[in-house]
Image (cartoon, rainbow, N blue to C red):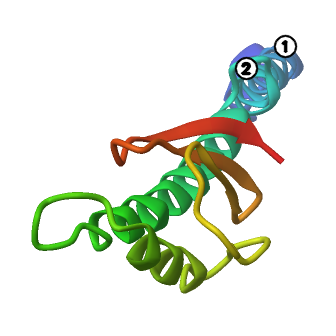
Amino acid sequence: MKLKNRADKGITLVALVITIIILLILAGITLVSLLGENGLLKKVSKASEEDKYARAEEKVKLAVMASYDETGSLNKELLKQNVNQIEGLYEKVDKVEFDLKIVVDGYNFTIKETGEVIRRGKK
């Protein structure tokens, strides 16, 4: 009878140790997935950086698209006005000469005579 009572008292020390070990392993896997080389936090940081670049590129492309005149040519005066209105422009443009190099939100862009916008990298 006494043996049966001991078994009925609840969780054993061995089961408790095994449970703790399993929880530690799961916690380690979670930390590696968050902080590892290709972890979630690095992916979030990369996605945020790509989003900032895409927003800056969109501002430049919109300014270029709004700079075409009635003949379908890229108008330098319109381009100068539109580029200077870009929010986040590092330095105002005094004269448009192609390949026009500008910095928007910390990203370098080149505007070609054809209207093509090329990313040159981060400032």
Q: Front-most of 36 and 20?
A: 36
* Image-quadrant location for residue 1: top right
Residue located beneath label 1 in the image: 14
115 lies above or below 121 = below
Q: Given this view, does label 1 or label 2 mark the residue nearer the observer?
A: 2
In the image: residue 123, left or right of residue 79: right
Q: Amino acid at mark 1?
A: Val
Mark 1 / mark 2, whichever is N-terminal? 1
90 lies above or below 28 = below
Callout 2: helix, strand or loop? helix
In the image: residue 73, left or right of residue 5: left
Task: Please give the name of the residue rendered at 65% of the width and 69% of the height, measured from the top-left corner.
Answer: 95
Residue located beneath label 2 in the image: 29
User: Does residue 41 appear in the picture of this structure?
Assistant: no
Q: Amino acid at mark 2?
A: Ile
Q: Position of residue 18 (x, y in %)?
A: 79, 14
In the image: residue 77, left or right of residue 19: left
